[in-house]
Amino acid sequence: MKASYKLYFFLIPALMYQLIFGIYPLIYNFILSLKDVNLITYMGGTSQWIGLSNYVQTLKDTVFQRAFFNTLVFTGLSLSFQFIIGFLLALLFNRSFPLKGLLQSLIMVPWVLPIIVSGSFFRWFFSDRGMVNGFLLSWGLIDKPIPWITSQALPIFSVTMANIWLGIPFSFVLLYTGLRAIPLELFESAEIDGANWWQKVLFIAVPLLKPVIITTLTLGCILTVKVFDLVWIITKGGPGEVSHLLSTLSYSLAFDKFQFGKASSVLVIMLLLTIGLTIFLNSIRAKEESSIG
Amino acid sequence: MKWSLRMILIMAMVLVAVVTSVGFTQEKVTLTVQDYYGSVNDNGRFIDEMAVEFEKNHPNVKVNHIDIPFAQYLPTLLQQTLTKTLPDIIMADNPSVPQLIKAGTYKDLTDKVKEWGLENWEDFFKGHQEVTSSEGKIYAFQFTTNSCALFYRKGLLDKAGIANPPETWQELKEDSKKIKEVLGINAFGFDASATEGGTWQFEPFLWSNGGSLLELDQPEAIEALQFLTDMVKEGYVSRDVVNVSSQGDPTQWFINGEIPFMVNGNWEFGWQLTEDVMQQLGDVHVAPLPVPEKGKRIIVPFGGECFGISSNIDPAKYDLAWEFLKLLVSSDNMLKLNTEGDSGLPTRASVAKEILGTKPILKVFLEQAQYALPRPLMGGMDKYPDVSSFVWVAIQKALTGVATPEKAFKEAARNIQGLFSPEDYEKYKQLARTLLQEVSER
Amino acid sequence: MGKKRRAKEWKWTLIALIPTVIIILPVYFIAIGGFQTVAEIFHCPAYWFPPHPTLEFYNDAWADLLPYLKNSLIIALGNLALTLVVAIPAAFALSKFRLKLGKPTFFILAFTQMLPVTAVIIPLSLMFIKLKLINNYFSVILGIAVFTIPFATIILRAYIQGIPTGLIEAALIDGASLFRVFRSIIVPLSSPAIATAGILTLIMTWGDFIVSLTFLKDQTVQPMSIGLYHFVAQYGVEWNKLMAGSMIFAVPPLIVALLAGKSIVTGLTAGAFKE
C-alpha cells in the first residue's frame, strides 16, 4: 500500500530507540574488537589499535573453530526440533477440549522457569550419576554411565537437547496464535472437498502461516545463536572447552581471562553469523511477499 | 477496551518513572560496603554487626551492605571498575586482588596505615601482606582466610576395613580400591569445575609434589595431574567432578555417604557441615591432604577475601570509609569474628595465636596455614586469573580423557608462557620456585 | 448425543496430556525439590516422591522472595507498557506499507537484538551513567526495552500482515485517518497477537537478571530474579530453597499466560470475510 508521511510517526519511536540504545553497544563492541584490550589497558586508556589482529588470532584458534561448529549444530538442531514439536503441538491444540487452557499454560513453564534452575536440573539430569544414566543402568541397557556432559563429543548434543526443551513454548505460542487466526471455514470447506489432515496442514495452514513461520524461525535463530545462560550453567563450555558456543566463548574470554578485545571479535563474528542466517531466512520471505502483492 | 488498558499502563509507567527518578533526599551520609557474603554466613553477619556499631558511633552515617551473588561478583566488579562506579568499600577474593590493584580499583592506603601504626599491618601474615600490597604501597587488608584438607567419614572407613586416613597418594589409591571393592561406591570427591575452584583444589597436589603453575610441562606437575586422572580412570572418582556447581556439591555426596573422602575447606563448618549436621553424621574428621611420599609436607594455597577502599571514593567520605575498614580488621574484632564464627581463620598472627587450641576441628587448618602460599605470587601476580584459567581447562581435559595429562599440561604451559614477556616470565618463575622451596624446607 | 461429544473431546485431552507430561517432567522434579533437604535432593538414585516432605523451605523461600515481588511487578509492567506503546504502531507501519525506511528499520530491529545481554551491559551502563539514569526502575525498564521492543515489533508485524489489506484500504477510501484505522481496525483485530507479544515480552522481562543486577544496586529495588540468586552462594547452593523459590517465581507469569491465552480466540477475521 502507498506510504504516507504520517506513518513515520508510527515508526520513529521504535527506530530512534534502537538507534540510540541499540546501535551504540554494537559499535562499542566493534571498536573494542579492533584494539588490544585487557583490564589494565582499558583502565589506563592505553589500549592499542591493532586492526584485524584479534580476528586473525581468533580464526586460527582451535577453541574458536570448535565453538563456531558447535554454534551451527546447536542452532540448526534446536531450531528444527523446536519448530517441529511446537508446530505439532499448535496443531494438536487447535481445537477445543476440556482443560485445554491449563495444559497450554503448563507447556509455557519451560520458558518461565529461571534458567539457573532448569539449567542446573539438566546438569544433574545428564551427569554420570544423574537420571538418564540411572534409568539406562537400572534397565540394563548400558553397564557404564554414558558421559553425556563429561566427554569430548557428547556435551554439545546434551546441551542442545536441553535447549530444545527450553524453546518449545516459544515456537508453540507463536505458531498457535497464527493458526488460530485462520478461519475454521477454510479447513471445513477443504474437508468437504475430501482433503485429509496432512493435506490441510500443507496446503492451507502452511501457506497462510508463512509470515509467522518465517518470523518464528528468524527470531528463534537470533535468540538461539546467542543462548548463553543455559550452556554456561550446564557445562560452562567444558569440559576442557569442548562445548563452547560463540556466546560462552566470548563471555569466558571477557570475564575469565579479561581479554576484552578478543571477546569482542568473537562477538562480532557471532553477529555476522546471525546476520547471514537472518538474511537467508528473509530472502525466502521476500520471495513470498512479491508473489502475494 | 484495549486502548484504555494501555492508557492506564502508560500512566502507571510515567508515574513510576517520576516517583523513582525524583529520588529521596538524604541528610545522612551513606557508606556502601559490597561483598558476596550475604547475611546468612558468619562473615556477612559480622559485617552487619559492625555496621550497626558504626552507625551508633556515627549518627549521621548509614552503612549500606550490598550483597552481590557470588557467581556474578567478578563481572560486576569489573563493570563497576570500567565505569568508575565502585562502591565505597569493596571486597575481593584474594587471588584477584593483585590484578585489581594494577587496574586501579583500590585506593592507596599507605599513609592511613602509617597513621594507624605499621605494627598493625605487620601483624598480618606475610602471604596476606604480599597479596594486598604492591611496590611498597598498601591497598587492602585480608579479612579472613581458609584452606583445604581431607575430610573423611570414619564410619565408612571402618566398614571398608581402613584404620587410618591415607597419608600418601599411594595409600589413598589403595584405600579407594578397598572402598570400591567392599562398599561399591566412589571413594573421593573434589572440585574440578571450570572455575578458580578447580585450580585451587589442584594446587595442593601440584605444590606438594614440587610442581609450579608456571612450569606445567615439567614432570612434577604432570605427575600430580596423572595421579588424579588415574583416580578417575579407575573409577575411584566420578567424572561428575568436572561439572560441579561449586565445592559444595561434593559435600552433599559426602553427607549422603556416597563418598568417604573429599577435598574441602574449613568454611564448611559454617556452611553445610554445621554443628547439627556434624552431630547427626557423627563421624566426620579432618586430616591433612595426602602427599606424594611420606615425609613431604602438605603445601596448600590460602583462600579468603580482602577489603579495601575504592579508588573513586568521594574524598569527603574517605576518612569515614577508613574508620569502618579499620573496624573490620582490628585485632579485637577479628578475634570476635573467629571466636563466634566457625567458617574462617584469622589473618593476623596475634589473633591466630589466641584461637589456636580453642577449636579442635580447625587444628589441621591452623597448622597448615603456616605454610600456605599466596596464589598470585605462585602464578604471575596480576596475571594469576589468566594463568588459572589455562590450568582448569587442562585439568578438565585430562580428567575426562579428552587429552593425556602430559599433552594437556604441555599445551597449558605454552599458553601460560605466552602471557608474559620473557623477562617477566623468568622473574615470576623464579619467585614461585623460591617461595615453594622456602616453605618446603622450613 | 451430548455424552458422545464429551467423550470425543476428552480423547483430545488425553492425547494432549502425553506431550505435556513429558515437557513438564523436569518441572516436577524441581517442584518436589522444594519439599526436601538438600541432601535428599542429591540422593542417588533420585527420589520420585519426597521422603519426608516439609513446607519449611517453601515458607522460607516465600519469606525471602516476597520483598522483591513488588519490584518485579513494577519493572515488568513498566517495560510492557513502554514496549507495546512503541512496538504496535511500528509493527503496523512496517507491515503493510512500502516505506523507504522500512527495510533498514527492520534490519536494525533484528540486529540490535543479536548481541547477548552480557555484551551490551557495559556500553549501556557507560551511556546511562552519562545520562544520569542509574539506580532506579527507569534504567532497567529502558535497558530491557532494547531487547523487548524489537522482539515485540517483529512478532506483531508478522500477524498484522495477516489482516486483510482490503479492510484497511476500504476504511482509508471512506476518509478515515491513519490513526483512526490503527485504533479501530488494527488494534482490535490484532489483539490475539498483542496478547501473545505481551506474554512473551512479560516473560522475558520477568526473567531478566543481568540488566537488573547491573543497574540496581539497592536491594530494596531489585526484582525477584536477583532475590533467587541469593540462594546461590559462595560455597554451595541452597538447592531446596532455590527450587521452591523458582516455582514461586514462575507463578505470576504463568497466571498471565493462562489469562491471556483465553483472549487468543479463533476466527476473529472470519467475521470480516463474511461481510
Image: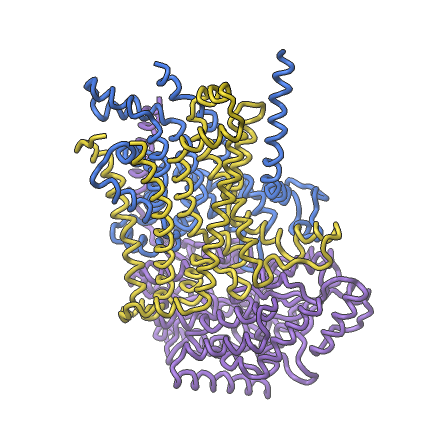
Q: Please, which residue is most extreme toward the front here?
A: A194
Residue B185 in the image: x percent, y percent? 75, 62
| Residue depicted at x 45% and y 27% | A180
Residue C205 in the image: x percent, y percent? 41, 41
Colouring: by chain
Residue B353 seen in the figure: no
Q: Please, which residue is most extreme toward the top here?
A: C1
Figure colour of chain B: purple
Residue C79: image quadrant is: top left
Query: Between residues A138 and B358, which one lies in front from this camera angle?
Result: A138
Q: Please, which residue is most extreme toward the left here?
A: A5
Total count of labels: 0
Residue C179: image quadrant is: top left
Residue C65 in the image: x percent, y percent? 51, 42
Query: Between residues A188 and B364, which one lies in front from this camera angle?
Result: A188
- Asked whether, in this view, residue C188 is left or right of residue B405, the answer is left
In the rendered image, what is the letter of the chain coloured blue? C
Query: Between residues B62 and C9, which one lies in front from this camera angle?
Result: C9
Residue B333 in the image: x percent, y percent? 51, 65
Does A240 sit above or below residue B58? Answer: below
Figure colour of chain A: yellow
**For the N terminus of chain A, which image quadrant?**
top left
| Residue depicted at x 36% and y 18% | C273
